[in-house]
Image: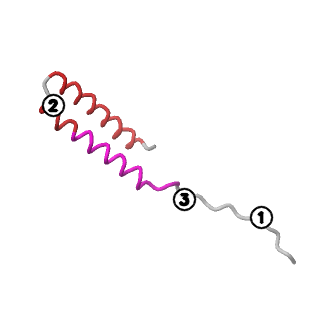
Amino acid sequence: MKLADVLILSLALAFIIIGIHLSLTIGVEASYAIFMFAVALLFWFQYRRTNAPKEPNKPKPKSKKRKKH
């Protein structure tokens, strides 16, 4: 996982915690925007994971077959 992915996931978790705190203290109406932003970050994280290249381009190993003379 890249640094950007870790940051996006951490921000989403932080916004979820803030949203829970706001919904318990003030109400759900006050925390709705926070939850929606957290969900948007989670969707972005999932999008980045599914569209990330699988592995960097590695050179293919050369076969060690002997040629017949």
Mark nearer the N terminus (2 vs 1): 2
Dot 1 surroundings within 10 Å: few (below 14), some, or many (20 or more)?
few
Q: Which residue is mark 2?
A: 28
Instruction: Give the prevailing secondary structure in the magenta stretch.
Output: helix
The span picked out in magenta is: 36-55
Q: Position of residue 25 (x, y in %)?
A: 16, 21
**Type of amino acid under label 1:** Lys
Quadrant of the drawing holding the C terminus: bottom right
**What count of labels does the image hold?**
3
Q: Are marks 2 and 1 in contact (CB under 8 Å)?
A: no
Instruction: Give the farthest residue toward the top.
Output: 25
Give the residue drawn at x 22%, y 37%. 35
Q: Which residue is mark 3?
A: 57
Could you say whether the residue bearing mark 3 is in a helix, strand or loop? loop
Q: Which residue is mark 1?
A: 64
**Type of amino acid under label 3:** Asn
Q: Position of residue 32 (x, y in %)?
A: 17, 36
- Residue 69 placement, left or right of 21: right
Could you say whether the residue bearing mark 2 is in a helix, strand or loop? helix
Q: CA distance from mark 1 to mark 3?
A: 21 Å
Q: Position of residue 26 (x, y in %)?
A: 13, 24
Q: Which mark is residue 53?
A: none
Dot 2 surroundings within 10 Å: few (below 14), some, or many (20 or more)?
some
Nearer mark to the viewer, of 2 and 1: 2
Mark nearer the N terminus (3 vs 2): 2
- Residue 34 placement, left or right of 56: left
Q: CA distance from mark 2 to mark 1?
A: 66 Å
Residue 62 part of the magenta segment: no
Q: CA distance from mark 3 to mark 2?
A: 48 Å
**Type of amino acid under label 2:** Val
Q: Position of residue 49 (x, y in %)?
A: 41, 49
